[in-house]
Amino acid sequence: MLDQVVQPKNVFRAVERSKVYASVVDQILQNIQSGRFPPGSSLPSERVLADQLAVSRGSLREAIRVLEHAGVLDVRVGSGTYVTEGGRSQTAMLRAQAAVIGEHSPLDLIVARAAIEPVCAEQAATAHHPTDLAHMEATLHEQAELTHQGKDPSAADLAFHLAVATASHNGVLLAIEQNLIELMHEQTWSELKHRSRSRVHAAEQYLEHHELVLGAIRRRDARRAHQLMAMHMAAIEVGIVAELERSDGPNGQGS
Amino acid sequence: MLDQVVQPKNVFRAVERSKVYASVVDQILQNIQSGRFPPGSSLPSERVLADQLAVSRGSLREAIRVLEHAGVLDVRVGSGTYVTEGGRSQTAMLRAQAAVIGEHSPLDLIVARAAIEPVCAEQAATAHHPTDLAHMEATLHEQAELTHQGKDPSAADLAFHLAVATASHNGVLLAIEQNLIELMHEQTWSELKHRSRSRVHAAEQYLEHHELVLGAIRRRDARRAHQLMAMHMAAIEVGIVAELERSDGPNGQGS
DNA sequence: ACCGGATGGGTGGTCGGACCAATTATGTGA
DNA sequence: TCACATAATTGGTCCGACCACCCATCCGGT
């Protein structure tokens, strides 16, 4: 049963995954993904499973807690631990997200941003509140100061985008934007964008784009906001592509 | 210090959040969000924190494990438990996602889908592999059968969209699509769409849209694929809006 | 024979203590 | 003052005990 997958050697994938609970998480995910525990089915009891995995029940519980919180498992007191109906897709998502974080191409991110950001701006133009406007202005002000001082305005730049998504008052768009921003914190992206920004006047250009977008939002011109943000995304893409060409593609043509 | 937030009464937000570890997760998140533990700072040791929260160290560890896996905390053996640099935004994301799952409007989801799905189709037209095509066809075939039998084709419908996102070979778009599909599993959405689909010939219409989109993808006509998917999204929006009007808005004008 | 209630066994939840591995701080000697 | 050793503190894992909850089975009553 589970005995065959308890061998430490072929379970541990990286040094930081050598902890017992992390290894248990992986093994449970594997068994869900492989179909051994289909949605709706129950795992063996904690006591039995801990025995099979040759770990303490405490360590197993820590792993189960992670998966419960991720929506993969549904834990019912007195009854058992079940794989959720969406457990398989959640498992796939956890793995997909891990894969994305580790392997996505900067161009992938650009395409997604090009799809989402203009719609955020458009929605912000129609839905924003006065406090949203003040917040967007504050982030823009900070970006301006950092840009004029020759400092790295990345954080303020992203903060402006986040403020726009917040001003859209669309919870789904905001959640997506936050996920995208998290991906942008990855090293490769920050480095590429920093280098694209350091081309002549790029930082000033991005700042100006933001100012134009904010103006359209302030005027509640949704179409114009959409257009200007799309143009801003195109400019970023041009900068990133130029950097990729120049550095001869740290990610090849990846996908 | 933390004593003041240990009072059970104002911590528990719902019945299912009464478990100790879940309550501990919430309290830690609150303290990060409030700035008490800024990024880079360390939490009190497990023994001290468990004492302060008046819980056992095992329960605290389960909570910490959840937050570690979510990227909020960085746990170092022999050193301590630290809030990650992105811990605050991760905290915000966890809370945003919880908020989204609980409170988003179907219209929010439509807007986001309208932004993403056509781009998925467009990318799939240029990037798909033969296996992608076969997979999209299979899901479409299943949708057709279920539709013609008068059964609920929702699952196959969503599976087609997921297959399109997979065929885009853009990891970020796929991750976003998977998140959107998870949101669509929420009860309100499924019910609204089911009702919109039950209008005369709607299910047939949606099936036809999918077939047209697949045709454009097959021909590698990116622009047409984008257009057709956008039209499909518009048709869904019309159907959903009509249902919302008819049911007198279960979500009001929500945001 | 069927239905409802009680009971027992099995489930997860929490606690506390013990011990081990890793890191950090402190003390001592050169 | 610096380097090394030791002690203290940290997280990691295990174990056993006990409690609350759930489910299945059995028994009694109609």
Image (cartoon, coloured by chain):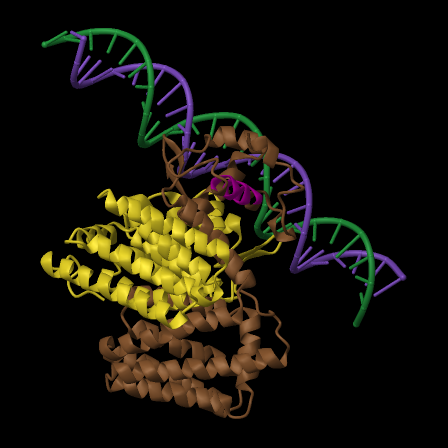
Chain colours: A brown, B yellow, C purple, D green
Q: Does the magenta stretch include residue B213?
A: no
Instruction: Tell whether A170 sits left or right of A236.
Output: left
- The residue shown at (33%, 79%) is A135
Q: Where is residue A226 in the image (x, y as percent from the top left)?
A: 32, 80
Specify whether residue A30 is painted magenta. Answer: yes
Give the magenta part as a residue range: A23-32
Image height of A177 relative to A160, above or below: above
Image coords of residue B160 (percent x, y):
36, 54
Residue closer to the observer: A251 or A68: A251
Q: From the viewer's side, name the closer residue of B76 and A188.
A: A188
Q: Position of residue B182 (x, y in %)?
A: 35, 53
Q: How many labels does the image show?
A: 0
* Residue B237: % across, % down: 22, 64
Residue C16 vertical placement versus B140 (above, below): above
Quarter-of-image position of residue A191:
bottom right
The quarter of the picture where the C terminus of chain B appears is: bottom left
**In the rendered image, which quarter is residue B177 located in?**
bottom left
Q: Is residue B105 visible?
A: no
Quadrant into which the N terminus of chain B falls: bottom left
Q: Which residue does the image show at 57% across and 34% down from the upper left? A: A53
> For this rendering, which residue is in front, B168 or B248?
B168
**Residue B159 sits above or below residue A152 on the image:** above
Q: Residue at x 47, y 52 (%)?
A: A94
Q: Is most of the magenta stretch helix, strand or loop?
A: helix
Camera sees residue A160:
yes
